[in-house]
Image (cartoon, coloured by chain):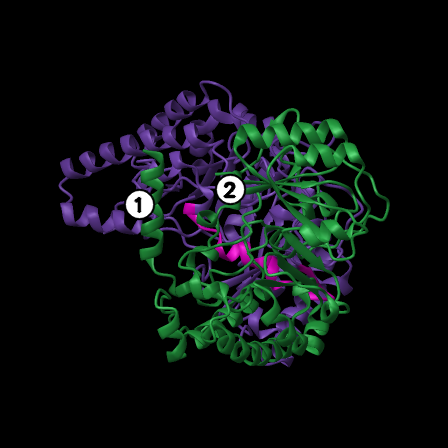
Amino acid sequence: MDNIKDSAKGWREEESKNVTFIVTKDCQLICKYCYLVGKNTHERMPFETAKQSIDYLLDTPEFSSEPAVVFEFIGGEPFLEIDLIDKICDYIKTQLFVKNHHWFNAYRFSFSTNGINYHTKKVQDFIKKNYSHISIGITIDGTQKKHDLNRIYKNGKGSYDDVLKNIPLWLEQFPGAGTKVTISSADIPYVCESVLHLYSLGIEEVNINCVYENVWKEGDDILFENQLMKLADEIIDNNLYKKYSCSFFSTKIGKPVNVLLENHNFCGAGKMLSIDAAGNFYPCTRFAQYSLRDKKAIIIGDMHKGIDKNKLRPFLTLDRFTQCPRECLECEVAGGCGWCSGENYDAAVSATIFQRSMANCLMHKARVRANNYYWNKLYRKLEIEGISENEIASQCIHHNKIC
Amino acid sequence: MLQYLIVQLCDTSTSYCHYENPSRTPRLISLEDLNAGILFAMKENLMIQFVYPDEELPLSYKKAVDSIDHNTIVSSLCEDQNLVAEADIVIFHEWTGLDYFAFNMEQAYVLRTSKDDFFDRYAQLKWVFPRVKRFNIVFTDIESFSEDDYKHYKKILNHLSENIEKLLIEGLPIQFNLLTDRLTLSTMNNCNAGWKTITLAPNGRFYPCPAFYFDDDSLIGDVHKGLEIKNPQLYSFDYAPICRHCDAYQCKRCVWLNKKLTLEINTPSHEQCVISHLERNASRKILKNSNLKKEMKDLSEIPEIDYLDPFDVREQWDFELLQQELIKFHKENY
């Protein structure tokens, strides 16, 4: 029985190394909520930089010990550099074979794109060439109104129409693919209609989250809660939960967190590696200078000298207890309340990754209330429909994706 | 809780720790700021440590300094040799001169040395040990220790520990930071910059320690406007994930070196951890001497461990320590 649609897990999520190439800092769009404050048209990764970085990684067993690898290409907009990406991917494949590396056939090329160039011959040729090793997510933010509110060209025009036309091709090539939706203050009134709109386009998985930056206005949490409850009603009343998932609703959120058992950091900063056009290494893209408003970039090495292990130590020992304020440690609904170490660093009062930002506190609490409403309503409905408690419990165990 | 105020009297005040003082032009703290610093210390109940330049102070400064009980930190090369003779802590910046210096059992001594000089000249310490009550070695290039250096350092510590052991059994109360501090400690005892100790620099501003004045913009306040330490908890041992799991209690845990090498004040470098553990293990070896145990009955056991860097065994860190921290946290906050 499959009563509740489960969110898909990432490819070999638990056992793969993530290596990100910042191939360009250029993008056709200037999305209003974009955290990349230093986008520009001149920082494009030379192939030689990618090559040297790949050589370093593949030749350093200490940093390639994971059973699998995801090579992620980001920008700006990565598909602006499809020729370069194609060349990099060819080099990776060749080297994995030549070095008889354990990542040979255990690799993935992953892309988050604005979707504008998806249909072009070069991108399509690349997809065909690497099809069995590719994950692509196209970002479409919901209804045209919501999408064009934020995701605009440099001339101010909305990008919705240009993205929408590529959605059918994308879903045909990657059935079941999910999209990422970002919520900022101005988007809140459109949350419900946007998720439903994405479902109507055939996108079955909507991974949605609030931005981590401190953008919220007084009363946003209540508006957000109301939107989520409206969405919950729509999903449940129209049986959409059988086919579609929305990461806002999860059985794992809103419970107290036992710090003794869950003392780890929320994200993988430091376990992943991000490389920029100059060949500098970062613990995550969010620590590159173009991502930071107020702080200096944290560079943990470069393609010439390799990784400075001392600079990785804070990231690999960063725990919940040390970075969370008392209020968070004592919070009774802390489960699923996420943070971004890069944003924490950028927002901290001193240059440290050990100070958690609380900008999202009220939004998380609003989400928890709506989430409780969702599950209480859904359980009751399933009970009335005669689904046994065990079956419901079993479904809910699997439905634990947290955005 | 703050306990000490270090006052850097001049831009050229001697370095007494890991950092280098690059200043060559003497620029004294203003008399107004000095007096304000003294007043701050009196009101906050802080013990003052004045760090002197090699040049003699003007009379007005001497008067101000003498207006409060304090400790004196001075270089062995200071022009005012009377001050050197009376100082609480005398700093050597090189090994030359050690063998003809008139040591005094009432004073403590610090030798700032590079790793290579230490490796070449450590035998000189055997001459020094019987003549002093306390002698500290501070390395100026910790970040340059290599795997081979660790092996060499271990050998030298073991060699020196035989000498220390002998002196202790003879009843000489020698304190040598690399080998005897760990013997008597049962909790962390580090420099505590930014937590128990702050520094007033010649520009009238507060820093966690003098090193930050020369090397960084980590201001923590102003002598006239007061202290403003951002994220003060991160200077404390409780908020240092690696140090929380460590029993190399004698480690300097230098927050400036932490910041320089790992970019975080609460995270020590690999080199810092390994060096401290080699010292810890050498102390353990001294403690195993049964004759010493008879002489010093209060000493606690130092357990055997199979790592030199707690970071390397982070997967094994048990919950018990965290639990203790949480209990402490609750006691302090509720």
Q: Position of residue A299 (x, y in %)?
A: 67, 54
Q: Nearer the viewer, residue A392 or A293?
A: A293
Residue in view at x 33 percent, y 30 percent:
A370
Q: Nearer the viewer, residue B220 or B111?
A: B111
Looking at the rendering, in which quadrant would you find the C terminus of chain B?
Answer: top left
Instruction: Describe residue A285's horizontal placement relative to residue A40 as left or right.
Output: left
Q: Position of residue A234 (x, y in %)?
A: 34, 29
Label 2 and label 1 in one chain: no
Please tell me in which quadrant of the rendered image residue B210 appears. Answer: top right
Instruction: Describe residue A264's horizontal placement relative to residue A216 as left or right.
Output: left
Which residue, given by chain and number where applicable, does mark 2 sit on?
A: A180
| Three-letter amino acid code of the residue under disc 1 | Ile
Q: Visible in this render: residue A121? A: no
Instruction: Describe residue B134's horizontal placement relative to residue A372 as left or right.
Output: right
What is the drawing colour of chain A? purple
Residue A320 in magenta stretch: yes
Q: Is residue A131 above or below residue B62?
A: below
Q: Position of residue A114 (x, y in %)?
A: 62, 42
| Three-letter amino acid code of the residue under disc 2 | Lys
> How many labels were placed on the picture?
2
What is the drawing colour of chain B? green
Q: Chain of mark 1?
A: B
Q: Chain of mark 2?
A: A
Q: Residue furthest top?
A: A219
Q: Position of residue B264 (x, y in %)?
A: 58, 50
Which residue, given by chain and number where applicable, does mark 1 sit on?
A: B327
Q: Nearer the viewer, residue A286 or A132?
A: A286
Residue in view at x 62 percent, y 72 percent:
A58
Q: Which residues are magenta?
A: A301-321
Instruction: Describe residue B95's horizontal placement relative to residue A64 as left or right.
Output: right
Residue in view at x 45 percent, y 75 percent:
B169
